[in-house]
Image (cartoon, coloured by chain):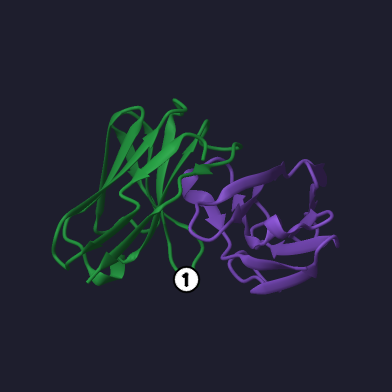
Chain colours: A green, B purple
Amino acid sequence: DAGITQSPRHKVTETGTPVTLRCHQTENHRYMYWYRQDPGHGLRLIHYSYGVKDTDKGEVSDGYSVSRSKTEDFLLTLESATSSQTSVYFCAISESIAGSPLHFGNGTRLTVT
Amino acid sequence: GESVGLHLPTLSVQEGDNSIINCAYSNSASDYFIWYKQESGKGPQFIIDIRSNMDKRQGQRVTVLLNKTVKHLSLQIAATQPGDSAVYFCAENIGGSARQLTFGSGTQLTVLP
């Protein structure tokens, strides 16, 4: 698992509530990512970070925000969860922004009712 | 032809046989490719990668072949074992941006006894 811990592993929440997912790494990698995985879609990038307090949007960033106050932690927040955000969320890390593979955590299964 | 995201959904092979999983990509500017294995309930696991200046790369029991002429990538698994049963998907990256790492939706490999 490349030293990546995601929490919680499972979460059920109601529409309109805020949700925060946490990713913690022990590899000291500079780059961290949040993806979502849905049936019929490949992994889609939500946000990524290239350093402490440095983040940028990905392909499907609407409705999500992120924060990275420490190298090892990357938080994903759904400010007001919607049913369309029911998904499996994966955190990933990499040594460089290009030319090196991403290593993934084991995911958080989020259900918004 | 198939593009990243449109794979054969399933592939069944006998234990001990070789497996070949294919992936077509659409962008001729892609310069880095990665194969991942994903078991049920787990995150994607890095298998092997290849850069566009190579045609072939070998790992332990796995070989990746890249044919840039027809924009095709394949993963060969030698002497397939029951533990190889999983979803396999490829990813392509264009020139060093996390936003331009595109994942396919995968092929389910089932190893028959």
The amino acid on which the numbered mark 1 sits, given as a three-letter code, is: Pro
Query: Residue A51: horizontal and vertical position, in percent?
Result: 37, 29
What element does badge 1 sit on?
loop
Query: Residue B100: horizontal and vertical position, in percent?
Result: 51, 50
Q: Quadrant of the C terminus of chain A?
A: bottom left
- For mark 1, what is the residue? A39
In the image, taking residue A66 as reference, residue B14 lies left or right, namely right
Q: Residue at x 16, y 60 (%)?
A: A80
Mark 1: give few (<14), some (14-19) or many (20+) Cα within 10 Å: few
| Residue B15 seen anywhere in this rendered image of the structure | yes
Q: Is residue B85 above or below residue B32?
A: below
| Residue B31 seen anywhere in this rendered image of the structure | no
Frontmost residue, B13 versus B36: B13
Query: Residue B66: horizontal and vertical position, in percent?
Result: 78, 52
Q: Residue at x 80, y 62 (%)?
A: B19
Frontmost residue, A63 versus B97: A63
Q: Residue at x 56, y 38 (%)?
A: A98
In the image, taking residue A34 as reference, residue A68 lies left or right, namely left
Q: Residue extending furthest left? A: A16
Q: Chain of mark 1?
A: A
Query: Residue B52: horizontal and vertical position, in percent?
Result: 73, 45
The image quarter in which residue B85 lies: bottom right
The image quarter in which residue B73 lies: bottom right
Q: Is residue B68 above or below residue A56?
A: below
